[in-house]
Amino acid sequence: MPASPPAAGEPPQESTPAPPPSPAPARGAAVVAEVIDVRAPGPAEPGALAAAPGGDGFLAGARDGTVLHVSAAGETRHVGVVWEVSLGPANALLGLAAQPGWLYASYVTAASGLTLARHSWDASGLGHYPHTFLTGVPAAGARRGGALAFGPDGLLYAGTGDAGQPALARDPASPAGKVLRMTSLGRVPDGNPDPGSFRYADGHGDVRGLAWDAAGRPWVADAGTVAAPGGAASPLWSGGEQTGPGLACAAGALWLPGAGSGLWRLPLDGRGGLVAPPQLHLAGQLAGAVGLVAVAGELWVLAGGWRLTRLRVR
């Protein structure tokens, strides 16, 4: 039965905030449970990984824009090509996210910089006419961003880079060096700092990972650091050149690839801090990781060329 409204003149009752999640153990573990050798699309290098909607395996993207569907049983099917990526050798797919019926991609082209687009998607493959809802984001050099993920609020978040120009990250008029937030239709949602702008958080250098902890708190992997969006007073961790692209939350910890191999575990205390210093697991394994997603409390990593690895973590 719903609670009775307060009597006239009485202040509304405040709801009791949910307690923070329990702290993660100081020490954890990551164990390889399964390895799937994806049937690679020719010589193309892997570039991105997303969980397919409804628990139906994964969508793995090559840097040339080719997208594959990999079932939970390891069967690989060609889905299509993010069309503009394939038009030039300087172009590259950076990120993927998916919802039922739609595939979202972030990619860079020599002509248009960083671009965000949406393709229809079903059993027959990708639709031929993408909806491009942002293009022309500066993406020169290595600081190009490219992270793409749906948040617990159902909105799409995208990370961009500052293209080696930190002033752009502080400029509210520029989409560079930002975390952007938008609806699944590529529109500006309510609650962004500027009405009419995708801008959600400023001051970033190279956002290559986005994740949310058990409390719904957002985190970004940005140019070797893990921090709250928008440049908190101090980052959660500064890993520098020890880190690679990607970020996920599982078993009470944040996880991100090592620069050469392995996987970093950042055990969270449930209140926005760390229980213990980060630890590197699986050193010498998972080389060249380009995609990392959490599914049902486990991690899946696209690394070692076209090897999709399932990890049990704690």
Image (cartoon, grey):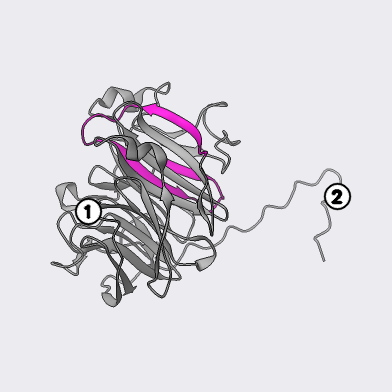
Residue nearest the viewer, comparing 148 with 110: 110
Q: Quadrant of the N terminus?
A: bottom right
286 left or right of 153 in image: left
Image position, residue 134 (x, y; %):
46, 31
- Does residue 73 appear anywhere in the picture? yes
Q: Is residue 140 magenta?
A: yes
Q: Pointer 1 and pointer 2: residues touching (CB < 8 Å)?
A: no
Q: Quadrant of the C terminus?
A: bottom left
Instruction: Point out the residue furthest to the right here.
Output: 8
Residue 43's disc is 1
Residue nearest the viewer, comparing 108 with 293: 108
Identify the residue shown where x is 22% and y is 46%.
224
Residue with the mark numbered 2: 7
Identify the residue shown where x is 35% and y is 42%.
146
Q: Considering only vertical position in the picture, is 182 above or below 124?
A: above
Q: Earlier in the sequence, mark 1 or mark 2?
A: 2
- Does residue 231 appear anywhere in the picture? no
Identified by mark 2, the residue type is Ala
| Element under disc 2 | loop
79 left or right of 233 in image: right
Image position, residue 97 (x, y; %):
45, 51
Image position, residue 266 (x, y; %):
29, 61
Identified by mark 1, the residue type is Pro
Q: Is residue 116 magenta?
A: no
Image position, residue 82 (x, y; %):
41, 43
* Front disc: 1 or 2: 1
Q: Residues within 10 Å of mark 1 (few under 14, many from 20)?
A: few
The magenta segment: 129-158
| Element under disc 1 | loop
Mark 1–mark 2 Cα distance, whole angstroms, equals: 70 Å
Identify the residue shown where x is 42% and y is 23%.
172
